[in-house]
Amino acid sequence: MQALLKLIGKESRGVPCRPTRPIPLDDPAQVWSVHDAVSTRDDERPVTLFVFERQRHQGSQANARALLARNGVQRLRTVRHPDVLRYLESTEASANAAQTETIQLVTEAVVPLQFVIRADPISLSLEAIVWGLFCIARALHFIHQEMKSVHGRLSPATVFVTTGGDWKLGGLEVLTEHSHWQRLRDGRTLQFAHYWPPEMHQSSESLSLPVHALDAWAFGCLMYDLFSHGQYHSTDELRRIEVIPEPLRQLYPQFLAADGSKRAPLSAFFEHETMLQMPFVRLNLALDRLPLTERWEKQTVVQTLLEELDSLPPHFCMGKASPLLQQAIDLGVADAPAVQAVLRIRRRFDTKQGPAEPAFINSVTRWLTCSQIELRAEVIESLDWLVERTDAKLLNSVLFPAMVANLSPSVTVSASHVGAVQGSADNRVGSMTTERPLPTPLRDTVLKTISTIAPRLNERNLNQVLMGHFAKLQLDPESTIRTNTTVCLGKIATSLNPTTRRKVLVAAFTRAMRDPFPPARSAGILALQATADLYSKEEMVGRILPALCQGLGDSVADVREQAFRVIEGYLERLRGIHEQEKQREERERVADIHRPNTTSTAVGGGTRASSSSSPSPGSWQLANIAASLVDVFDGTNTASQAGRAASATSNRSSDQATTVATTEMKAWASGSASQPPTKQQQPLMDSKSNRLVSEQPRVVNGGPQATHAASMRSNAFAPSEPGSLSASSLARPAAESLWETALAEERMLTANAVISRGLATNTSNQRPDEEPPIAPDSVSAQDNFLTQTKRSSLSEAAASTDWGQLLNTGDARRRRPAKLGAARRPTG
């Protein structure tokens, strides 16, 4: 018992498949319920699930149906024929040792012919029906001749259609040996009544019939049922021969002869010349024996398939032609035209949403890495469509490694294959291999495809594997490959991680700019332009702009123009970065000045007052002063230059006027002139001596230091507004800047020295017996004496001193030590 259960496929677990939808089936036997399903073991491969459930039947009928189901499973396991439904696996679950509760049978993916006739009769064209009947006739002939048995249940409920349009014979539950065909009378309820032959209604036990007689009658009834689109209900309708197409009218009556011994065997159908001349039948037959045909026959079949592709049924192309060609290619018995046919069929008829089947992608990967360059070429031409139909996992693990293998300049092929391709009869080289160059257009196509799939690649493939191949391609002997590598790298730059960008992009593009091929140099420049947003300021200044500047001297005008244009773009970008940083620095400086905890310094009345928060009260905040001075020199640079130019012009005019005034002063002092210098001439002399006349009271009363301190307080430390010292309060015209203040101080010290030397000279030249011209107790007389003495001293100082050279503002700082020393030496 255990051996029998093992033979029919009983297992303790269910079959590894998952039902997806039930398929309605009107079968008089009522043994099976049919379901579309997918295998959970073989990558979701479509299968068909037949299920027998005991609970659907009652009493003795349940036992009888269980025996039929078990017999059908056993027959499918033992009958192996291409036109018989292919068994995959089965399982049987029992409630106890005596009763079977459930039987599950898994077969290849099929649909009952009855369902096709009712759901989509238009798809059953004349060629499709003829080929289907051709398959059923071959299966019945095999049962009759090889097994010496009778099928006994031929009808649309026991014929199944595959996805490729082939028809498979099923329903082997009552398969009986020919010697016991009388037993079929007991199972007449298992078949449609209008399919029973006349012999089944006779009670003669000694009736002798050929082995094919019963099934030949049912075959004729099936022909009428198909061409009447399922409207066959009575044997009286079989006389309407006009329903049958013209090519089959000669064969149709031969299967419906009233005398069973005169009925034609099923071989008469598939061996008839009319059947063999039909193009669709011939194409199917050629595809079935494709692995066994010669090379020229394979090429003929593939060429016919490509020519008639538009008129062939889509289910035939996708379900049969493509898988058979694919299998032949994998076995090595088909070449590049077969690959072309498979890919064209897939692109034209594959309307299924989602990624392609893993089995198909694996086959494509094998073709992409095979030793036949022609096969690689056909696959590479269709890469754009293949990558779209491949999910991310298969793309990274299977298809991408095969793609980058075609980036190398040459591939290794076996010498035997080279001899076969070239038609050589001497293939004794065996396992020897040779290198064959890979055509440049194919490598270029791979590069273009990689640029489209870069966002779908994982981290390792994109940033490590692909970058390693690109590093080699930039040194490739083919100039077009080097150029397109740079273009491809520029397109996928945004998909790279930041670390790879810093290491690869600038180095690769600057290398391309040194390429001897002008389009490669141009590609490097344009790539730098396209990826400008990915670089930092340091990279642009230190690496990119120096490299671009070399392009300005390129020997090709187009390259130079592109370099100029890209440099201008980078300069504009750097200028924008500079403006942003400048605004940020100004905001930070203003924020520091107006921060509540910052010490503010107020200047008023010639004194400085420091806030109580200052770390050293009464002292200046040097940091704020330095920042303000920077602002002063930055903000008044242009004004200072203009002021110095105006000051130089004024000094030249003043020197000329002073020379005239000095001459007149000498003449007046010596007595040769009767009138002193006019009031208009006097200020000219005073301007060169820092207005000594107007400052004379301060000199007399306070001395040079007092004058210098007052000048410094009035010019340097008098803010325009009360408040803390800031950039706006330190901003002065060019004449009042720190530089001009130092010049004024120098002029004042020099003038005081000259006056002092003049007074000493006058005192030493006065005779002892000469009385002073002014009484000491008379203020007015004293003032006149001082004025007179100052004029005399000023005249002599002007006569002995070169004021234009001494007070030259441009050279004052450089000549200051020498001139001050010269001014202080006694004149003798």
Image (cartoon, helix red, strand yellow):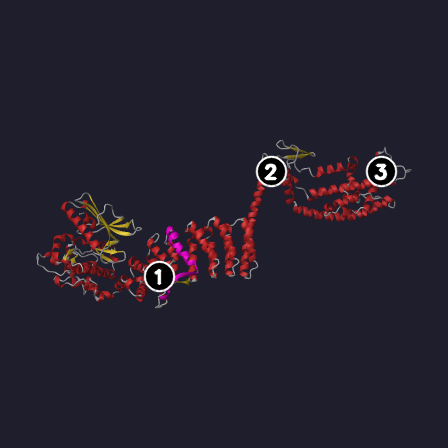
- Between discs 1 and 2, the one toward the N terminus: 1
> Which mark lies nearer to you, 1 or 2?
1
Q: Amino acid at mark 2?
A: Ile
From the viewer's perspective, is 553 left or right of 653? left
Residue 685 is drawn in which quadrant? top right
Residue 595 is drawn in which quadrant? top right
**Magenta stretch mostly in which secondary structure?**
helix
Q: Nearer the viewer, residue 523 or 147?
A: 147
In whole angstroms, how far apart are the C-alphas of marks 3 and 1?
124 Å
| Residue 357 visible, this angle | no
Residue position marked by numbered label 3 in the rendering = 785
* The residue stretch that appears in magenta: 392-419
Q: Which quadrant of the figure contains the C terminus? A: top right
In whole angstroms, how far apart are the C-alphas of marks 1 and 2?
77 Å
> Which mark lies nearer to you, 3 or 1?
1
Residue position marked by numbered label 1 in the rendering = 340
Residue position marked by numbered label 2 in the rendering = 593
Dot 2: element: helix
Q: Position of residue 235 (x, y in %)?
A: 14, 58
Dot 3: element: helix
Report the residue that reaches farthest toward the right: 769
> Which mark lies nearer to you, 3 or 2?
2
Q: Amino acid at mark 3?
A: Phe
Label 2: how many residues lie within 10 Å, few (<14), some (14-19) or many (20+)? some
Q: Is residue 818 above or below residue 235?
A: above
Q: Nearer the viewer, residue 335 or 755?
A: 335
Dot 1: element: helix
- Between discs 3 and 2, the one toward the N terminus: 2
In whole angstroms, how far apart are the C-alphas of marks 3 and 2?
55 Å
Residue 492 belongs to magenta span: no
Q: Position of residue 152 (x, y in %)?
A: 16, 56
Residue 400 belongs to magenta span: yes
